[in-house]
Amino acid sequence: GESVGLHLPTLSVQEGDNSIINCAYSNSASDYFIWYKQESGKGPQFIIDIRSNMDKRQGQRVTVLLNKTVKHLSLQIAATQPGDSAVYFCAESGAGNNRKLIWGLGTSLAVNP
Amino acid sequence: DGGITQSPKYLFRKEGQNVTLSCEQNLNHDAMYWYRQDPGQGLRLIYYSQIVNDFQKGDIAEGYSVSREKKESFPLTVTSAQKNPTAFYLCASSTMDEQYFGPGTRLTVT
């Protein structure tokens, strides 16, 4: 079946360092990718998204990179802060999924002061 | 103030009882979704609705039921047939691709 998977289930970084969270996907027909942040006991919050006609998109302190050749997605967080500690999920969707999101398993990011 | 509301935040029920979780949105979104999340796990789709009076099963629909009588509302009923109902339940809505989530309801069944 098609799935979205994450390379690292947990990631620990020092405050101020840059963080990179990776995600692999297997559905080449997916044309939309999105990253969410989920803090403990709360609903996921949108971070950034990217369409398949782009390779890179930047937001405030975050950058998403899409490599369609190897079906790889990454989220880069610059100058990681304690408030960035959360679980990060990638998700994909495509025309064949009725716009449903297919979710990855999540990566837990811990920021050490 | 636009958004998605879920109530209650915490819900406790005895085994064998049906329970209904509320989800309301004022974002004028056509599509709504219900997910289940277990501790340390990702999101699993229970049901989704792309338009009023229509809904489809997700990956884990057994033991759950939904209705979509109004665009703003998408209640989820956890029936006694659900073997492991204790979980964190998330409702979401969308107009295109991005889904907006509510704060979740934590259901505990004993």
Image (cartoon, coloured by chain):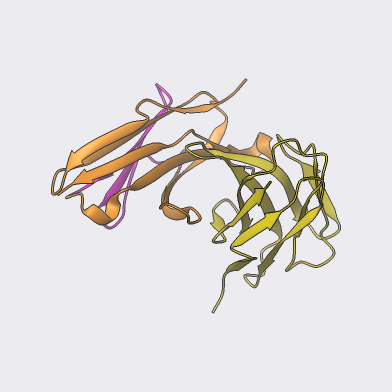
User: In the rendered image of this protein, does residue B71 appear above or below residue A15?
Assistant: below
Could one spot residue A42 in this view of the protein? yes
In the image, residue A23 sits, relative to residue A99, either above or below, namely above
Chain A shade: orange
- Where is residue B24 drawn, in percent x and y? 68, 68
Rendering quarter of residue B12? bottom right
Q: Residue at x 39, y 44 (%)?
A: A87
* Residue A40 lies in the magenta stretch: no
Q: Residue at x 62, y 20 (%)?
A: A1
Image vertical order of residue A10 relative to residue B74, above or below = above
Query: In the rendered view, does B58 fall on the left or right side of B93?
Result: right
In the image, the segment drawn in magenta is A51-78
Q: Nearer the viewer, residue A58 or B108?
A: B108
Q: Residue at coordinates 51% horizontally, 55% vertically from top-left? A: A43
Q: Is residue B95 visible?
A: no
Quarter of the view holding residue A83: bottom left
* Viewer-nearest residue: A54 or B81: B81
Q: Is residue B89 left or right of residue A80?
A: right
Percent of width and height locating residue B41: 51, 36
Q: Is residue A67 magenta?
A: yes
Q: Colour of chain B?
A: yellow
Image spot of residue B7 (x, y percent): 65, 66
Residue A37: give x, y in percent of width and height. 41, 50
> Which residue, as the protein is rendered here, is positioned at the far bottom?
B1
Residue at 63% x, 46% y is: B35
